[in-house]
Image (tube, rainbow, N blue to C red):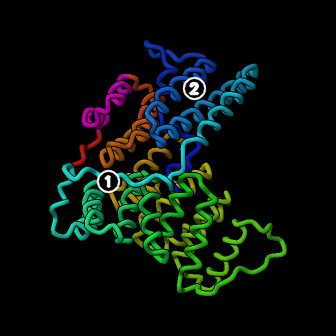
């Protein structure tokens, strides 16, 4: 579905940067693990930013996977127990990062928001979102919610903005607020389920997607069939319910999208890709469904197939931060690191405050042996990096 599902890529580059000597020579794989563990955790957790901390864990997983592969190829096995102990420690810390649903939404200060004096900030927010000017749309929608915090659709649209900017934790806060005010807001429920999947919270995702079916008037009273081979889990119940909905409305593209999300949760990626492909074909110009399809293919280790799907999505919505990020991840999966870096730069033009995308960029530049640019990425010199990499500077 989204960038959070890409297990092969690192989101925080500090650990990898620590693996390089000053002259650009790589250290041993064992030194990489030690440096990554120490530096990534010390620097990222010191920020008390859950997204950055989660990004650090992704970086460590990247180092873990590559190091074990290198050691196996070299016939080395002496550090396996040490790696497993280190990763167990990482997992334990990751569990303590907090619940995104419990984090209250933080508004931009009024003095920093030019839309607080707008006559109709909600409509301005809608227009800005449709134009792909998502950062400005966030400010306008926040101004609208300052006027009426009970507006469920304003919360939903604000959540959609943050999701497009690859900020699922902020999206969850907004979408939970939307559903709290309007439990029958189907768009908010579907988007909330996706964001929970991106945050790897399958339990909440399943509950939300079940509510999407139960609150959908098209499927009022629909009950899952008793399956003699079912295992009685919530996953089984929701999948059976969605299959009934699909049988009831086989051409309903929203049902196909939700089924695609569910199959991703259950790791049935072939079924997920089939549902999302059919939904994309039915949806015509639906860049969001194309993005989900691309991410599903990438998570099936089919990044080469994912790239043209992302390109279709970006042709429909060029100012799509999450789409550029996911495209970069697929390039990186294929070891096309300079192409990955260019895609990350396009994403950062749209959301320069995304620390985890800066992390992806540093990893790509490191693997591309562009160590001359890693320091500039650390300084977040976006315009300079775009110039060096031949990326046109985004205007407006």
On whether residue 145 falls in the magenta region, the answer is no
Q: Give the x, y percent position of residue 228.
A: 84, 75
Left or right side of 174 for 306: right
Residue holding disc 1: 107
Please report the residue visible at 29 percent of the width from the left and 54 percent of the height from the top. 135
Give the Cα separation between the discs numbered 2 and 1.
Answer: 34 Å
Q: Give the x, y percent position of residue 357.
A: 41, 41
Please report the residue visible at 36 percent of the width from the left and 22 percent of the height from the top. 372
- Relative height, residue 62 to residue 298 (above, below): above
Main SS of residues in magenta = helix
Label 2 Cα crowd, 10 Å radius (few <14 / some 14-19 / many 20+): many
Name the secondary structure under disc 1.
Answer: loop
- Residue placed most toward the observer, 381 or 37: 37
- Relative height, residue 226 to residue 269 (above, below): below
Which dot marks residue 37? 2
Q: Nearer the viewer, mark 2 or mark 1?
A: 1
Mark 2 or mark 1: which comes first in sequence?
2
Left or right side of 106 for 54: right
């Amino acid at each position: 579905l989204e960038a959070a599902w890409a297990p092969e890529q690192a989101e925080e580059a500090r650990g990898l940067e620590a693996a390089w000597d000053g002259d650009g020579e790589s250290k041993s794989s064992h030194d990489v693990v030690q440096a990554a563990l120490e530096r990534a955790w010390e620097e990222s957790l010191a920020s008390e930013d859950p997204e950055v901390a989660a990004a650090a864990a992704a970086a460590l997983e990247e180092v873990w996977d590559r190091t074990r592969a290198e050691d196996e190829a070299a016939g080395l096995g002496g550090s396996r127990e040490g790696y497993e102990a280190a990763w167990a420690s990482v997992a334990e810390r990751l569990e303590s990062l907090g619940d995104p649903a419990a984090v209250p939404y933080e508004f931009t200060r009024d003095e920093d928001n030019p839309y607080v004096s707008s006559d109709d900030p909600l409509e301005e927010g809608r227009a800005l979102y449709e134009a792909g000017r998502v950062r400005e749309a966030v400010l306008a929608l926040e101004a609208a919610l300052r006027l009426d915090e009970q507006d469920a659709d304003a919360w939903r649209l604000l959540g959609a903005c943050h999701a497009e900017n690859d900020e699922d934790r902020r999206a969850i806060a907004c979408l939970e607020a939307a559903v709290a005010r309007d439990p029958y807001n189907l768009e908010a429920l579907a988007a909330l389920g996706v964001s929970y999947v991106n945050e790897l919270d399958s339990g909440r995702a399943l509950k939300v997607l079940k509510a999407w079916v139960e609150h959908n008037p098209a499927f009022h009273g629909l009950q899952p069939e008793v399956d003699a081979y079912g295992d009685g889990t919530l996953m089984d119940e929701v999948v059976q319910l969605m299959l009934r909905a699909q049988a009831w409305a086989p051409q309903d593209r929203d049902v196909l999208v939700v089924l695609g999300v569910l199959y991703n949760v259950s790791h049935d990626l072939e079924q997920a890709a089939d549902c999302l492909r059919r939904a994309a074909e039915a949806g015509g110009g639906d860049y969001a469904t194309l993005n989900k399809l691309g991410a599903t293919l990438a998570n099936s280790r089919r990044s080469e197939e994912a790239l043209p799907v992302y390109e279709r999505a970006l042709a429909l919505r060029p100012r799509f931060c999450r789409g550029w990020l996911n495209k970069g991840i697929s390039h990186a999966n294929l070891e096309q690191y300079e192409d990955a870096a260019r895609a990350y730069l396009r994403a950062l033009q749209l959301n320069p405050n995304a620390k985890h995308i800066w992390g992806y960029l540093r990893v790509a530049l490191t693997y591309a042996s562009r160590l001359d640019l890693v320091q500039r990425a650390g300084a977040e010199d976006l315009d300079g990096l775009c110039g060096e990499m031949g990326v046109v500077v985004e205007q407006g």
